[in-house]
Amino acid sequence: MKGLIIINAFAKEANQLNQPLRLKEEFEKIGVEADIRPLDVSACGISDGEIAVKYIGYDFCVFYDKDKHALLQLEKNGLKCFNCYDAMTVCDDKMLTYIKLSGFGIPMPETYSAPLCYSPYAATNGESIDFLADKLGFPMIVKECYGSLGKGVHIVCDKAELADAADRLRFVPHVYQKFIAESKGTDLRVIVVGGKYVGAMKRTSAGDFRSNVSAGGRGEAFDADEKTVTLAEKIARILKLDYCGIDFLFGKSGLILCEVNSNAFFKEFEKVTGINVAEKYAAHIVRSVRGLNA
């Protein structure tokens, strides 16, 4: 068996390379060859009306990028990908994630999607500002739909700041969300592999409302209860994810979904929990390719 691990063409930082290197290491331990390759412009495209893929001769692909066009081409060319196109596309868009999970009893913050804007002369709608202030109150979270590592997440404290954020982001897909004050600077990262709970890590930041490790947060192992395990596995199942990191906020009445990451980093998670996430993911992929996970 031979696998392809796709990384972003511009990936150079250690935190971007740790994931594929760890996975390659675990594949090799179980006798599976794995090549790490960049997703450059020549990797795939349309030629003579057909999909042309540079990387051939592989049984599966672990896709560590967010280029949904390339992922769809690889899948359409017959390559089994982890995660799949549908799952990655939903998780990459925060509002799409909330919409997909709605109606399943998943606790989520009250959220409204910003209207799309195409005119450079458009002005912020005062009625919209009043509506959001009335529905969500302050402070309020303004979150870009596409982003990770805590980037693109803003907090606004009054109507003036909200109007300024709405104006700055009018060409960027984003959402307005109720701030969960009880969880300020704290959240819970749960890892799920193959639909099964792997472990949990509580993240805390003393100086930021965001708790991402990349934003200065610190992680510690967390003993999740049965309700949390069931909720995390349910989310992964609905979104058809082979691997994910699910972030929860601590609300007054229990956990509230923050977001779902289809390519969640696990370096800090492995460090603080002692759980070999890469080993579990590699084993799941091999079982799936061999048809043993049914």
Image (tube, rainbow, N blue to C red):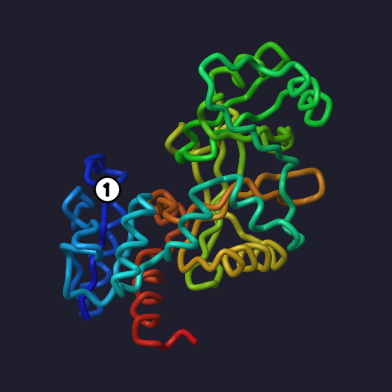
Instruction: Tell me: 118 left or right of 101.
Output: left
Which quadrant of the structure image shows residue 222?
A: bottom right
The residue positioned 58% from the left and 48% from the top of the image is 259
The residue positioned 76% from the left and 51% from the top of the image is 254
The residue positioned 74% from the left and 63% from the top of the image is 104
State the residue lying farthest toward the front: 48
Residue 214's spot in the image, x, y percent? 42, 36
Q: In the rendered image, which residue does mark 1 sit on?
A: 8
Residue 234's place in the image compared with 107, above or below, is: below
SS type, badge 1: strand
Instruction: Tell me: 48 left or right of 155.
Output: left
How packed is label 1: few (under 14 Cα within 10 Å), some, or many (20 or more)? some
User: Toward the viewer: 42 or 194?
Assistant: 42
Q: How many marks?
A: 1
User: Toward the viewer: 102 or 198?
Assistant: 102
User: Toward the viewer: 260 or 127?
Assistant: 127
Residue 143's spot in the image, x, y percent? 58, 33
Residue 120's spot in the image, x, y percent? 51, 17
State the residue lying farthest toward the top: 160
Residue type marked 1? Asn
Instruction: Tell me: 162 left or right of 271.
Output: right
